[in-house]
Image (cartoon, rainbow, N blue to C red):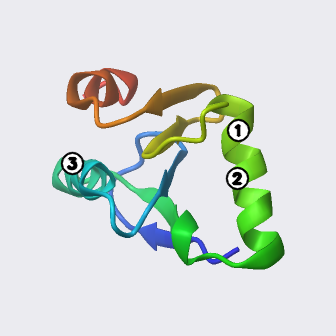
């Protein structure tokens, strides 16, 4: 799976599952970038075949509706949708 990495300060392990065409996914990516934190992301809609199936299976463990954006924080908290305050709180910023 092609996972993109954005450098920044370490605020924990952040993995964003997003769609390349989703405005809320773009806003979440921009928020993380503006906060200056390090994170990884993948555009699920650009994956194909088995990679896409694996990504969806991972997302569904945390978010059974498989909606986007889905942000995993330290493999222990899942934030679904663009929730600026919840994201900042999870990152302790």
Residue 67, x across and y down, in percent: 51, 41
Q: Identify the residue shown where x is 45% and y is 32%.
A: 80
Q: Which mark is residue 60?
A: 1
From this view, report whether residue 55 is shown above or below residue 21. above
User: Which mark sits nearer the N-terminus, 2 or 3?
Assistant: 3
Residue 58, x across and y down, in percent: 74, 46
- Of circles 3 and 1, which is in front? 1
Q: Residue furthest front?
A: 65
Tell me: 88 left or right of 47: left
Q: Identify the residue shown where x is 47% and y is 70%.
A: 5
Q: Identify the residue shown where x is 29% and y is 37%.
A: 82
Q: Which residue is mark 3?
A: 31
Q: Identify the residue shown where x is 42% and y is 46%.
A: 69
Q: Which mark is residue 56?
A: 2
Pointers 3 and 1 in contact (CB under 8 A)?
A: no
Q: Nearer the viewer, residue 49 or 25?
A: 49
Pointers 1 and 2 in contact (CB under 8 A)?
A: yes
**Location of the N terminus (image quadrant):** bottom right
């Amino acid at each position: 799976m092609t996972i993109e990495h954005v450098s920044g300060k370490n605020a924990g392990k952040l993995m964003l599952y997003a769609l390349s065409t989703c405005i809320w996914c773009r806003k979440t990516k921009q928020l993380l970038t503006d906060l200056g934190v390090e994170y990884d992301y993948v555009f699920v809609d650009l994956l194909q075949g088995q990679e896409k199936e694996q990504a969806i299976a991972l997302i569904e463990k945390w978010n059974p509706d498989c909606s986007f954006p889905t942000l995993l924080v330290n493999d222990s908290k899942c934030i679904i949708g663009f929730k600026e305050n919840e994201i900042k709180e999870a990152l302790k910023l």
